[in-house]
Image: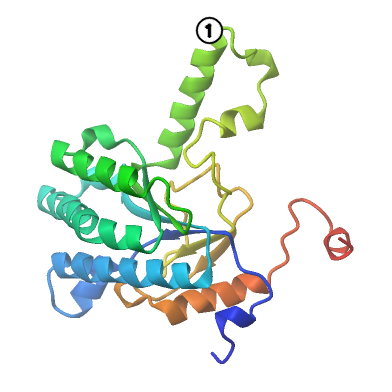
Amino acid sequence: MTEKWHDFPVLPRHIAIVMDGNGRWAQHRGLPRAAGHRAGAQSVRRVVQACHERGIEVLTLFAFSSENWQRPASEVRLLLELFAAALRKETDRAHEYNIRLRMIGDRSAFPRKLQQYIRRSEALTAENTGLNVVIAANYGGRWDIVQAVQQVLEQAQSAKLDAEALTPEDLAAALSLSDLPEPDLFIRTGGEQRISNFLLWQLAYTELYFSDCLWPEFAADDLDLALDAYSKRQRRFGRLAEQVDSR
């Protein structure tokens, strides 16, 4: 690839990534799955740095889904430990780079110490104005929609909202990330081509990009391949191509 990211005609404001392939990366090398997850944590740092350098506004990473609790207890424990360790090690560094850290998902199921680390990271970086790094942990798109509906129903019961006049905008306002632009570009590594219950509502008009690269191998050049593909797409949002070109 000869073209550099700063030559692309347009960059996404918000990138959402499903980080897939840690286990297979380790398996191909005869290593335990834990080694793949640890290597994947290093890829997170590389991609956050690359997005920071490219002026991306929001990076949302799917770190732990609500379905991941079904994995072996030892692997779940390792994933939570890696999450806690990353927060301990990276929060101060993110703060130095003016990066804001946030988490979406049901954090109530996490160990108390991990919840404390999350609160500290969010509080320390809350006023930062650079890249927003959003970690989706114990998150699911269906959960997100259900909790938004619950909020809307509570508003309707308290007469703050007319249920019959409910609009998509009303529901969107109660979803996670409602204060941020919706994802422009979705990336999934590892060769699989599915969304896996990630940001179901928010991805309605997102450009999808699937990479065969396993997550621990994903680097800035791989991100640029995705950015290059994105820059060549025409986003119509229901309009005709001629209408988009004429704007």
- Residue at point 16% right, 66% down? 33
Up the image or down, 225 lies above or below 69; here it is below
What residue would you read off at disc 1?
A: 158
Residue 192: quarter of image: bottom left
Q: Is residue 81 above or below residue 153?
A: below
Left or right side of 31 for 153 = right
| Mark 1 Cα shell of 10 Å, populated few (<14), some (14-19), many (≥20) | few
Q: How many marks?
A: 1
State the residue in front, 87 or 61. Answer: 87
Residue 218, percent across and down? Answer: 37, 75
Residue 190: tell me if it is visible.
Answer: no
Residue 5 rendering spot, x and y as whole percentages: 56, 79
Residue at x 19%, y 73% (from the top left corner): 27
Is the N terminus in the top left, top right, bottom left or bottom right quadrant?
A: bottom right
Instruction: Name the spot of residue 109 as percent of width and height, x first.
Output: 22, 34
- Quadrant in which the C terminus appears: bottom right
Residue 182 appears in the rendering: yes
- Residue drawn 58% across and 29% down? 171
x and y percent of residue 54 in the render?
52, 72
